[in-house]
Image: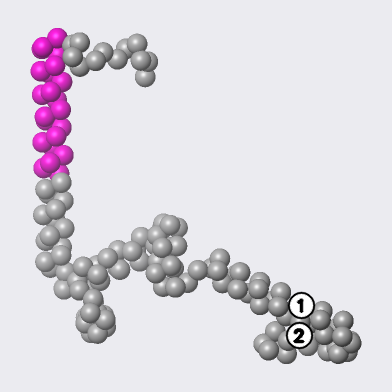
Amino acid sequence: MNDDNLIPFDERTKSEQREIAKKGGRRSGEARRRRRAMKDMLNTILLSAPTCIPEELQPAAERMNLDTNDMLYAASLFNRALTDIQAAKYMDELLGRNPTLELKREDTRLNRARFTLDKQKALGRVEFDDIFKPDDLITG
């Protein structure tokens, strides 16, 4: 927008101020009604939620002390993770899975094995045939 076209509210005429305030009031009422309708809809869903949770999951939810809201949150997170990469990453973090961390651990494990092999070679304790059997060094 061009700043020259902007007129401060207090420099407008009374009728212009009234018209702008009227439009803002209408929009505010629409937004308030929309939020109330959304809240009512969510309350309806939450009140009827036990029928939304599959019967085979209800015993597990009870064992884990999860209430209906937790189950609905988990279900919605799972559904969102199918299409949203950020939600999928968040779900992986919640599950304790972190692909980046797993790669770093694997890299560290291989570096340790390589270091051990180089050390054994330097000490003359590794024969040429043993080099092709790194499983002993990696797992040990």
Residue 96 seen anywhere in this rendered image of the structure = yes
Instruction: Choose mark 1 or mark 2, whichever is in front.
Output: 1
Residue 80, position as x, y percentages in the image: 36, 60
The color scheme shown is one colour
> Quick one: SS at disc 2?
loop
Quadrant of the frame with the N terminus: top left
Q: Earlier in the sequence, mark 1 or mark 2?
A: 1
Bounds of the magenta segment: 13-34
State the residue at coordinates (34%, 11%): 4
> Quick one: SS at disc 1?
helix
Going by the numbered disc 1, the residue's amino acid type is Phe
* Residue picked out by circle 2: 134
Residue 131 seen anywhere in this rendered image of the structure = no
* Residue picked out by circle 1: 115
State the residue at coordinates (76%, 82%): 116
Alpha-carbon distance for marks 1 and 2?
Answer: 12 Å
Counting other residues with Cα less than 10 Å from the Cα at mark 1, is it few (<14), some (14-19), or many (20 or more)?
few
State the residue at coordinates (45%, 62%): 89
